[in-house]
Amino acid sequence: GAVVSQHPSWVICKSGTSVKIECRSLDFQATTMFWYRQFPKQSLMLMATSNEGSKATYEQGVEKDKFLINHASLTLSTLTVTSAHPEDSSFYICSASSPVYGQGNSPLHFGNGTRLTVT
Amino acid sequence: DAKTTQPNSMESNEEEPVHLPCNHSTISGTDYIHWYRQLPSQGPEYVIHGLTSNVNNRMASLAIAEDRKSSTLILHRATLRDAAVYYCILRNIYNQGGKLIFGQGTELSVKP
């Protein structure tokens, strides 16, 4: 089955620094990747949708200059949290989709998440 | 995609069956019913999906009401590892791309 790998699984950084999170599709070409954020005891909130080779589409209220998304290849998307602050501490999750997996009758596959703690 | 309603939490005893309900009264004829679960500190994991007929796989069964306005995820014998948040999500067949909007889900706790 499809596998989505996310790295790192956890990261601690100092306030003001930037952190990059990678999301890879290991056995299929991911034309679309999604980034979610999840605060404790809350559900996943979609942050942005990225299509390979084009600019990401951000959900309302998500700062595109703060959360930089790059989807330069069919197997890799990155999320960079720039000038991180303690309120950016959260669990970040990606999912990857393809023309096959993107159809409504196909399962979707998620990375295992990245726990970001900003001190 | 249409909205779903689930209970916030449910409890089960280990090795007993669990029935997790989901209401989706505004479902359209081209909406698939998907279930995902999220174990603590992990990303969501696909469980099962269906359109009209009941579905079984190695993880669970999905019972879909005749009018499709509700469905039930059935775990036949709950184990401690089944403790997770279970999300019921509708995905339209024409929803190309794979965008999922998560509701609050049902937090299932399993007692030994």
Image (spheres, rainbow, N blue to C red):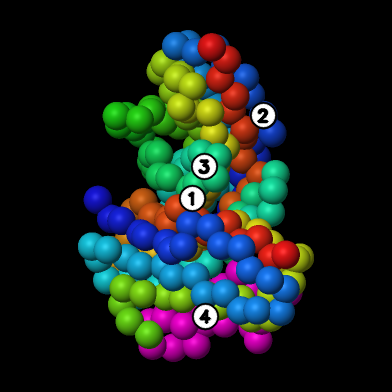
Position of residue A38 measured from the top left corner of the image (x, y, whole percent): 63, 55
Dot 1: element:
loop
Q: What residue is shown with label 3? A: B38
| A96 sits left or right of A27 in the view | right
Along the line of sight, which residue is nearer the eye, A118 or B85? A118
- Depth-wise, is mark 1 or mark 2 nearer the camera? 1
Which percent across, then down, holds residue B100?
52, 58
Magenta stretch? A47-71
Callout 1 and callout 2 share a chain: yes
Q: Chain of mark 3?
A: B
Which residue corresponds to mark 1? B43
Would residue B92 be found to the left or right of residue A68 on screen? left
Q: CA distance from mark 3 to mark 1?
A: 6 Å
Looking at the rendered structure, the kind of residue marked 2 is Ser
The residue that appears at 52% across and 75% down in the rendered structure is: A20
Residue at numbered disc 4: A69
Residue at mark 3 to residue at mark 2: CA–CA distance: 14 Å
The amino acid sitting under disc 1 is Gly
Return the residue at label 2.
B9
